[in-house]
Amino acid sequence: MADAMQKRRTDYGPPHYEQFLPPIVKENYGKWKYHEILKPGVMVHVSETDAKLYTVRSASGRLLSIDKIRMYCDLADKYCDGYIRFTSRHNVEFLLTKEENIDPLINSLDAIGHPVGGMGNSISAIVHTQGWVHCHSAATDASGVVKCVMDDLIEYFKEMKLPGKLRIALACCLNMCGAVHCSDIAILGVHRRPPRIDHANLRKVCEIPNVSASCPTAAIRPATVDGNPSVEVLEEQCMFCANCYTVCPAMPLNDPLNDGVSIWVGGKVSNARHEPMFSKLAIPFLPNNPPRWPEVTTAVRNLVELWAKNAHKYERMGEWIERIGWPKFFKMAGIEFQKEHIDDFKHAGLTYKRSTHLTF
Amino acid sequence: MADAMQKRRTDYGPPHYEQFLPPIVKENYGKWKYHEILKPGVMVHVSETDAKLYTVRSASGRLLSIDKIRMYCDLADKYCDGYIRFTSRHNVEFLLTKEENIDPLINSLDAIGHPVGGMGNSISAIVHTQGWVHCHSAATDASGVVKCVMDDLIEYFKEMKLPGKLRIALACCLNMCGAVHCSDIAILGVHRRPPRIDHANLRKVCEIPNVSASCPTAAIRPATVDGNPSVEVLEEQCMFCANCYTVCPAMPLNDPLNDGVSIWVGGKVSNARHEPMFSKLAIPFLPNNPPRWPEVTTAVRNLVELWAKNAHKYERMGEWIERIGWPKFFKMAGIEFQKEHIDDFKHAGLTYKRSTHLTF
Amino acid sequence: MADNIPKTPKLDELEKGGWPSFVKEIKMAAKRSPMGGDLLGQLEQSYNEKIGHWKHGGIVGVMGYGGGVIGRYSDLPEKYPNISHFHTMRINQPAGWYYTTDALRKICDIWEKHGSGLTNMHGSTGDIILLGTRTEELEPTFDDLQKIDFDIGGSGSDLRTPSCCCGMSRCEWACYDTMALTYDLTMHYQDELHRPAFPYKFKFKMSGCPNDCVASIARADMSIIGTWRDQIQVDQDAVREYAERGLDIQNDVISNCPGKCMEWDGKELNIENEFCVRCMHCINVMPKALRPGKDRGATILIGSKAPIIEGAFLSSVFIPFMKITPPYDEIKDLVDRIWDVWGEEGKNRERVGEFIQRVGLGNFLDAIEMEPIAEMVAHPRENPYVFYEEYYEEDDGEEEEES
Amino acid sequence: MADNIPKTPKLDELEKGGWPSFVKEIKMAAKRSPMGGDLLGQLEQSYNEKIGHWKHGGIVGVMGYGGGVIGRYSDLPEKYPNISHFHTMRINQPAGWYYTTDALRKICDIWEKHGSGLTNMHGSTGDIILLGTRTEELEPTFDDLQKIDFDIGGSGSDLRTPSCCCGMSRCEWACYDTMALTYDLTMHYQDELHRPAFPYKFKFKMSGCPNDCVASIARADMSIIGTWRDQIQVDQDAVREYAERGLDIQNDVISNCPGKCMEWDGKELNIENEFCVRCMHCINVMPKALRPGKDRGATILIGSKAPIIEGAFLSSVFIPFMKITPPYDEIKDLVDRIWDVWGEEGKNRERVGEFIQRVGLGNFLDAIEMEPIAEMVAHPRENPYVFYEEYYEEDDGEEEEES
Ligand code: SRM
Ligand code: SRM
Ligand code: SRM
Ligand code: SRM
Ligand code: SF4
Ligand code: SF4
Ligand code: SF4
Ligand code: SF4
Ligand code: SF4
Ligand code: SF4
Ligand code: SF4
Ligand code: SF4
């Protein structure tokens, strides 16, 4: 037993990546000279040694069964000498040295339902989170909404007909696991009802001072309810961040009548041209309407097409809006500007328009 | 007596401006078509009626004796049919209809020590405040520093050899009576020693709760000192705003050893090209060195000349710095970047550099 | 004739140099009034000691007025008895700072009789500043001012003296009559100007166009800045003339256009007015060729101020475009609604801009019964912390007021 | 073979359409493991009721590790007993997400044996996510993972699994070896990764150039982003070729340059590198003609995070330029100093970016013994509220520590 314990390794870390690199990558590591996108989802990298590496990028959907992974492995064995990689947006990439393998591979991927694309001026996969599949906090589903939106936008994944890259992200609650706060279009699950307190159990599962302290707006105060030491919430001070729930299970916010989705626009991450930007609120609330979330898919498509039609070449969503101004954006998008759009958090004053630079 | 009281008028307001307008202005009110700057300090406005109005702008110094005002009146009677105006930056303007009167007027103004200029791409008069001449709050003098700085920069008032307008303002304390917070170059009197409390008298002249509440950093707490109810200041929490002193005379901050001057750059008010901008801290502290404040005049001149040499045409100070970046500005100006330059007030986080847009 | 003029070696240094000398001015005044001599003495002492010698404030005034006089007392009254009192009177300037010499001379005469003979032309809010007199001279001074129709300006927690750029009187770009509006508002709000009843001061400043020559966006609780809604008026011949005379239209004009809405093919200047942000730059550079449009009015902005306490603010857009015509009821109605809410709920020493920021722009709009519009913000919120005020309850499925 | 696959009319709708279907994946998995069937059932119920059916958290784990497993329990365990436990294991991915099919198959085999057969490839922090298993399977799963050399990733208040763009392995723009650094830091900080001892989570993300393909500036407590210090390498012939083939260099490249530092006369592209802000745009548009300079390294930024609680942050510049070469002592030294101070003084659930903002960047620099530099700020302070720490006293004239 002591022996067994001794043998039990910990902290050995991930396998070294080198053993997973295709030989052409190892040989040309750090020697790549330029690349070219050959067609949607296919690019070639040319090395200083003149070696050529072809990449085929395919949508994975991210939630994968081991069956699908094994199918991928079969394809990688057949066309890529047994190597495969995934991208930072959860697409799968097949790295080929033989140009003639590209089309057969694409056909095989199509056959198992995995389109090729997401490269260049296109919409790549939606970075997203767990939703009702796995998380306790979710105000909406993740995989379902993503599926509906991408079904609807698939042409923009498969083709390269946009002014620039468009990155969509989804998070199922304000914790925003992902890059929702910096995406061209972001879909964010929101609660709209203050926590319902499980007074009977609160004291057993949470420390009251911690719960009170967790609220950024100081809406939570210790209170005695039905003889139980518990807390109360000043509802008009609650903005539904769910931080109290993260800290204390007896404060759930999930609520079918009031949960739903908000849409944000104009964020970006790259430093290309404009500095990185946060996403800004476009549509405060759309209902959860499973299984196909039609309100959400329509709203997102409208935004994509509005931008596609009006932006200059290379202009990301946020760069375009910055050029034309937010009032024009709201007008063109047919979105009513409401109180909800006006920031009222800590730095709100800095979002007011402090110049006469206006269009009419 | 009752009769006298009845006759005493109040709330009759200022005289109507119309009675003070020269006939040519009355006739062409709202009909001006264009203007041209003819030479430093002299411009002509041309009306749709073809009338021409010549303006000669002259530095007044702002603090004027009635003697000087009477001299101005003499000149206005002689050259301008008895009309005269002042500008929003406290210059005096003579409005002429006869072109041939321009040069004699300029000569007469020169003779009484009032240079003509401040128009177009020049430095106009410094908007300033009271200083030791009249205010209880002053951390530096106003008229004296202004005099020294303008003596030194007079060529830029008299000529038009700058890339754009350059506006300087001075305020003798953080109340900033004037436009110090939005000037190309701002000179600001600063205290650096926490209030020294007159414990014996505080309760007599101030309400302790008001005094405590006046402090934005909550540095002031009620305390009993030598048996007197008074307040104490947590010195490490004081940033010398003097708001407590404004509210309570028993909390003076004026202090010869620690008062002095800070220099700010890059603000602007107009909406031309760039939206209005706040001034930003360039030099945290320079000593009060009356009567000629050599450290201040040198610092200001260096900034003016650095900008004049490097800015593009029409680029105001702040626009130029924004183009080249603050690190370059500090390097070129030979100013050491220090902890004091880093914002640590409410919105400090928004001033951190949140991109990789850097120059080397 | 005063004979108390002291030796002032430090101040004498400030008689030298090309810029007008305030020391010379004080010395001139000192020949008429002993106040000047003691002021020189105290100021020389300040220059030696690097500290001012005025006591903190002091409430003095004129009968029937709550503001307009700044009380000031020397902290060395024995040494400088002639400035033991040295109060300032703020006199409401005529709009646009135009004067006849006759009017100016009368002011001088009054100040020779009752005060130090020193002035600021003008204070940075815009008033005529009569610098230095004794408490007992305030009422007589006001008496004489009445006779020449000059009234007192604002100070304390009241409406401050409104001021404006010269506008239509001498500028081709004025999009509304700044002087007329300034006069009208000043007259309409005489009570608010003279009797402090606000949480704190309130300032109006009117500029005729976005060049903002009265710095209104930086220092007025309400900034009224002229603008236009239609197209910039272009005289193509005049544009070509500028080009011929050497103006680099591409570099000097077009690449500085923040709307990125101009094109120049060497012959025609094309402006996509839909994207023009009315910055004035192209007009400023080519005043003979370009003019603001014909459908003119003003943008109303709110809330600018100096840094104490919340940090400095610039004014922010409230009404993107308003026609500005007498009797100005639309502005007055807006002002009244703002003052009502701020007057009721503003904290002591809280400027209206700070108040709006504290309660939230959206809530403020609700309170004054205005609709939010996108022009009010530089951009919509970046954080997801929305305060919804209502939610559905299980039993009814209808939207409920919060409990 | 599982036989508990329920009717899911709502979910079935999501088998349609062109995007890969997660429902199909769950159904495939459901054929192997009854967990899949119950997951479908519970999810269909969620789709009907519009609410999730998971209990709040639950602390489970693997012996010797404090993180890496997310406990998850159904709130309808009677109805869906096979997912009454449905924990997630986070497995540290190989840097750059490269695999041999051999390695992937082995992972699949383990997960077939011990779990639901469902995964995320990958989680948004970068881990391999093994989705759904029972508490008693955690240890055996880990046992098998050991044998194939895959270790557990981060969760809770620890170092989270570092991740990186593909960098030098497949990108011509990588300014340092992102994968090597990621591997090295991951190995060096195994203890911090596996045993939560921080105030809150800490994330590293490495991007090879300012395009930031791993979104590091938005979601890493430390963002290490490649850049260069010298000149962009220009192949003028290749530039001309782009122009000939129809690229509008003036409009597409030059007018988009944020440094405003490019000129094109139809023959030569001139870059004033002194003002280039290294944005990558021109290089992105003309990859055959332009390349980053030769003096390469990285900018180190600090503090980005999602909005809870203080609002979202982007990382801010900490070290404008650092050479990134093994053994990376300079970075490690920096990291250690930051962790020391934050670990000591950070509040519970306070990310390092929030901590810095609370104590002030200047004070934080003092604490970790670094000098402030202008590159750290977008601009210097606009408010005059400087906390001077020392002042002179009368008696000595020397600078004194505050009392
Ligand atoms: C494979 C991947 C890195 C990885 O290690 O996984 C990658 C690879 C490349 N990126 Fe990227 N980027 C990848 C995620 C990103 C991200 C991160 C994200 O989306 O979450 C960004 C930041 C997005 C943002 O700003 O919001 C990103 C911003 C860029 C940009 C800047 C685009 C812009 O104009 O803002 C370029 C340059 C370009 O495409 O012109 C770029 C260029 C490239 C190049 C051309 C680099 C090269 O020479 O190999 C690669 C192919 C581009 C393409 O897909 O069109 N890559 N790239 C990631 C693929 C994700 C996917 O499956 O779609
Ligand atoms: C005389 C004048 C300066 C000058 O030399 O021109 C002046 C002088 C004083 N100002 Fe001012 N302010 C003067 C224009 C301003 C301006 C500029 C403006 O109005 O355009 C500002 C900045 C804009 C603004 O309102 O924010 C200004 C912002 C302040 C403040 C800070 C207010 C704030 O909200 O931040 C104070 C402090 C206070 O009110 O307690 C202040 C307070 C004072 C006091 C009354 C001192 C005090 O603490 O009580 C000063 C009396 C000085 C004296 O002894 O004569 N003064 N003050 C200006 C008024 C002349 C006039 O009526 O024409
Ligand atoms: C007389 C005066 C208005 C008044 O009613 O008193 C005035 C008058 C004119 N201004 Fe002004 N401005 C006056 C204060 C201002 C101010 C306020 C200030 O300085 O405190 C500003 C905002 C300054 C700022 O942004 O910080 C101002 C920003 C402008 C601009 C924009 C300049 C820019 O590029 O940012 C112009 C346009 C131009 O000059 O090309 C302008 C243009 C003009 C024109 C050409 C307008 C016209 O057609 O008559 C006038 C002569 C310009 C000149 O002096 O070069 N005026 N002008 C003010 C003279 C002050 C002085 O004595 O120097
Ligand atoms: C699995 C994953 C989402 C996904 O589907 O990919 C995830 C899932 C959860 N995240 Fe996350 N986060 C995941 C990446 C992120 C990211 C993105 C990233 O790392 O690049 C972020 C935003 C970046 C950041 O760190 O700020 C993120 C910001 C949060 C936050 C907010 C933290 C904050 O400081 O604002 C929480 C709340 C918390 O920590 O209590 C959170 C909490 C959670 C918890 C543990 C829920 C909770 O309240 O305890 C979620 C468990 C879900 C479940 O049942 O499986 N998660 N989380 C991601 C981790 C997978 C992986 O290891 O690869
Ligand atoms: S975004 Fe919220 S609901 Fe979604 S996985 Fe993250 S913590 Fe869970
Ligand atoms: S949801 Fe957020 S705002 Fe509402 S009570 Fe909980 S912690 Fe406070
Ligand atoms: S800036 Fe300060 S010291 Fe100067 S006049 Fe105004 S309140 Fe007085
Ligand atoms: S000077 Fe300002 S910070 Fe210092 S104690 Fe007074 S009010 Fe507080
Ligand atoms: S603000 Fe406009 S209208 Fe008024 S003087 Fe200046 S340029 Fe003319
Ligand atoms: S006014 Fe300004 S924004 Fe409008 S066209 Fe002219 S330069 Fe461009
Ligand atoms: S971040 Fe730069 S180096 Fe890394 S993959 Fe993207 S473009 Fe290439
Ligand atoms: S990298 Fe960006 S800033 Fe530098 S020259 Fe190219 S486009 Fe301009």
Image: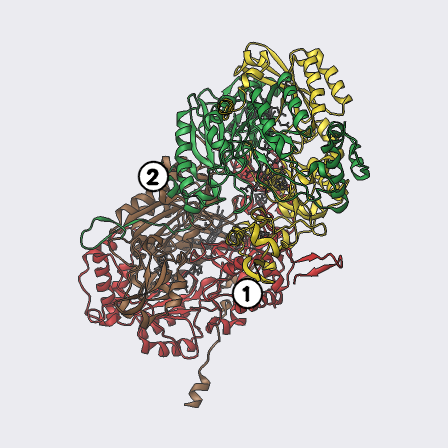
Chain colours: A yellow, B brown, C red, D green
> How far apart are labels 1 and 2 at the CA level?
47 Å
Taking depth in this image into account, of C315 and D57 the one nearest to the observer is: D57
Q: Which mark is residue D190?
A: none
Q: Position of residue C38 (x, y in %)?
A: 23, 67
Find numbered disc 2 in the image and state the secondary structure of the residue it sits on: loop
Q: Position of residue D226 (x, y in %)?
A: 49, 26
Is residue A117 visible in the rendered image? The answer is yes
Tell me: A283 left or right of C106: right
Taking depth in this image into account, of B108 and A306 the one nearest to the observer is: A306
How packed mark 2 is, by other alpha carbons closer than 10 Å (few <14, some 14-19, many 20 or more), is few
Q: Is mark 1 within 8 Å of ligand 9?
A: no
Q: Which residue is mark 2?
A: B335
Q: Which residue is mark 1?
A: C180
How packed mark 1 is, by other alpha carbons closer than 10 Å (few <14, some 14-19, many 20 or more), is many
Task: Determine the residue positioned at 62% across, 29% down.
Answer: D122
- Residue D209 vertical placement versus B9 (above, below): above
Nearer the observer: mark 1 or 2; the answer is: 2
Residue type beneath disc 2: Ile
